Image: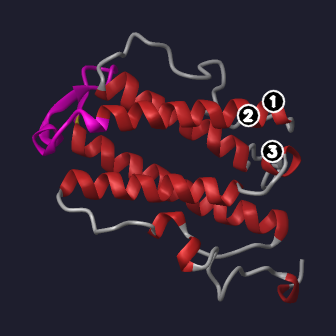
Amino acid sequence: MSSDQRQVGFDGIWLPGSEDPRAQQDAQPVGELAIYRDYLRHYRLTLELKCQDLGPEDLARQSVPPSDLSLLGLVRHMARVEHHWFRRVLEGNLDVPRLDSDDPTGGFHKVAPTQESVDEAFASWREQIAAADEWLDSVDEATLGETRDQGRDDESTSVRDVLVHMIEEYARHAGHADLLRECIDGRTGQ
């Protein structure tokens, strides 16, 4: 695709500011926990926007074969990440098996380009986000300094570290999603 065919959105941004769901807030978040939650919300919405208006074939399209990376794979991966860190580690349910435990790539492998696969991936991801948000609704700022068992070699981590890690995980994959979307239809933007 040549540079003159690129769709750079609205003056270089993905959506007009008045339509961007990430910017639709009454007030800036106050407090450490609220800031973490706002960043999570922002990056979750970014991944969803980068997948918007694409069919199963495009969502499952691999970036640079033989890499398994695809937008749909990112959605599946983030469902798995949300599940592990919130349901298993932060809620203390390490005996619950990981999602897609049979996929050593973390959700990227063998993504089927079908509507059923798309529906399943998004349903799982949204279910995990809802569970994570429910847990976050039940805690306060004091919880951030608490530690949780990670389930390996007696390692523990703070709740704060898990939330920062989740933001980092989404931010890194939002960058991947930017490039994947640009490869699909040339659309770029925030």
Residue 69 visible in the picture: no
Q: CA distance from mark 3 to mark 2?
A: 12 Å
Lower sequence index among marks 3 and 2: 3
Dot 3: within a 10 Å radius of its alpha carbon, few (fewer than 14), some, or many (20 or more) residues?
many
Apparent side of residue 70 relative to residue 102 in the rendered image (left or right): right
Q: Is residue 152 magenta?
A: yes
- The residue under label 3 is 60
- Of residues 65 and 79, the one nearer the viewer is 79
Q: What residue type is disc 3 on?
A: Ala
Q: Which amino acid, by three-letter code, is at mark 1?
A: Glu
With respect to residue 11, does 79 lie above or below?
above
Which residue is found at the position 57% from the left and 36% from the top?
A: 125
Q: Residue shown at 64%/74% (left/top)?
A: 14
> What are the residue bounds of the magenta stretch?
136-157
Numbered mark located on residue 116 in the image: 1
Instruction: State yes or no: residue 133 in magenta.
Output: no
Of the 4 image quadrants, the one containing the C terminus is bottom right
